[in-house]
Image (cartoon, grey):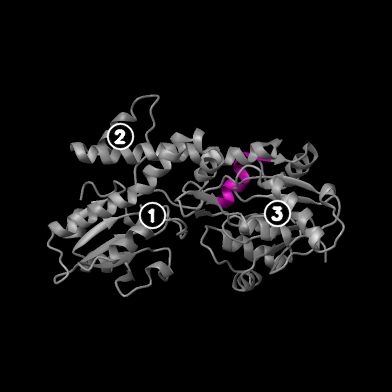
Amino acid sequence: MRYDICVLGLGYIGLPTASIFAARRKRVLGVDIAPGVVETINQGKIHIEEPDLDVLVKAAVQSGNLSATTAPAPADTYIIAVPTPFTIAPDGARKPGLAHVEAAARSLATVLAPGELIILESTSPVGTTAKIKEWLADEFHRLSLPDISGELRFAHCPERILPGQMLKELVSNDRIVGGLTPEAATQARELYKTFCTAEIFTTDAATAEMAKLAENAFRDVNIAFANELSIICEKIGVNVWELIRLANRHPRVKILQPGPGVGGHCIAVDPWFIVDAAPGQSRLIRTAREVNDAKPCHVIARALDLARASGATPSTPLTLACYGLAFKADVDDLRESPAVGIVQSLSQDPSLRILAVEPHITKLPKSLDSAKVTLTTMEDALARADMHILLVDHRPFKNLPAPAFRGKPILDTRGLWQAA
């Protein structure tokens, strides 16, 4: 069977994209290397948490327009939506990890035909779209196949969607499409017009790649300002939440809210791609990343100081309730989550027993799978804990009244419990 679209990678980006194309009557094949993910989707179910995605996937599968497998098949268009993490070199430098993109690209060599379109959606360093063409040329040579890389079209179309609002923003957000050739960009733009009601701007691939990195680096720099401000205010005895509220009354000031760090697969990762490409010219971007990466250490130190002041010792350990593990509010996504790292570090202290409260998951990640961390409910944590630390501003945690904490010590990294 020949498909309209083959989507490689059925995670937080690939699955919503595949299902929304299928809802527009495109014949879509989703590809994932995890058999469990493939089986779940073919049952019309989902393996990630996202509002309304379960309904969309179920309808797409039942209609016959969406199916999943572990290997690609012939299609008019191929969309690569696989992870692009960074790796840490021995000298501490962050290096873009493109192994998943390369593997996905090479897996297409045996099914491609001249004139077909390959779109990279994964957020990637500048030049990755061009590398896909090079990897395919090499794979054709390795497999003794005709080299048709010059007869294919390549484009980059980064997503700009927010977990928790993915399906809405896929449709309503402007998009950028960059091609290795103008023809590739135009062809990709026409495809995304299938469901995107906003404007779609065309450019070259390198500019499209850099645009996504610049967007997330901009946000990272602004978050770093808020996080650094919170540490300064703590040192000089100023309530940072009150300060930001008042400063933002200025018509041209919009300071963001500080937190325990920065997580997720975008803001916590993408700026490093810029730093790696131009280390001597990205001093501000590097510093912002370092400020945000250091914020969890500050939170850990504050939590331990509070525990010591409350009498925690290895012989008389206290129970600390940690509220939230996800990288942002109201999602189940734990990727690059500073909350997970904070809880993991605190769990190593012999004077603490940790209760983790995360309403969006049913089991702890492997990094927290120890006897010293117990996943529990908010009600149980409020009843049992000697101390409380807010790490993620999930809706269920908001506006808890002071009596709920029974006068126990609180560390609020999100500014929700100030009245408590």
Q: Residue 405's spot in the image, x, y percent? A: 20, 59
| Of marks 2 and 3, the one in the foreground | 3
Residue 211 shown left or right of residue 307 in the figure:
right
Among the two numbered marks 1 and 2 on one chain, the one whose residue lies closer to the N terminus: 2
Residue 248 shown left or right of residue 12 in the figure:
left
Q: Is residue 377 above or below residue 399?
A: below
Residue 314 shown left or right of residue 322 in the figure:
left
Q: Between 275 and 302, which is closer to the camera in this rendering?
A: 275
Q: In what element is the residue under mark 1?
A: helix
Q: Which quadrant of the view contains residue 23? A: bottom right
Q: Residue furthest top?
A: 251
What label sits on residue 245 in the rendered view? 2
Which residues, given as a range, are shown in magenta?
166-177
Q: Could you tell me the amino acid type at mark 1?
A: Pro
Q: Between 18 and 210, which is closer to the camera in this rendering?
A: 210
Residue 2 shown left or right of residue 99 in the figure:
right
Among the two numbered marks 3 and 1 on one chain, the one whose residue lies closer to the N terminus: 3
Q: Residue 418's spot in the image, x, y percent? A: 23, 46
Q: Could you tell me the amino acid type at mark 3?
A: Ile
Q: Which quadrant of the view contains residue 59? A: bottom right
Q: In what element is the residue under mark 3?
A: strand
Q: Which residue corresponds to mark 3? A: 79
Whether residue 195 can be seen here: no
Q: Could you tell me the amino acid type at mark 2?
A: Arg
Graded by Cα atoms within 10 Å as few (under 14), some (14 to 19) or many (20 or more), the crowding at tag 2 reads some
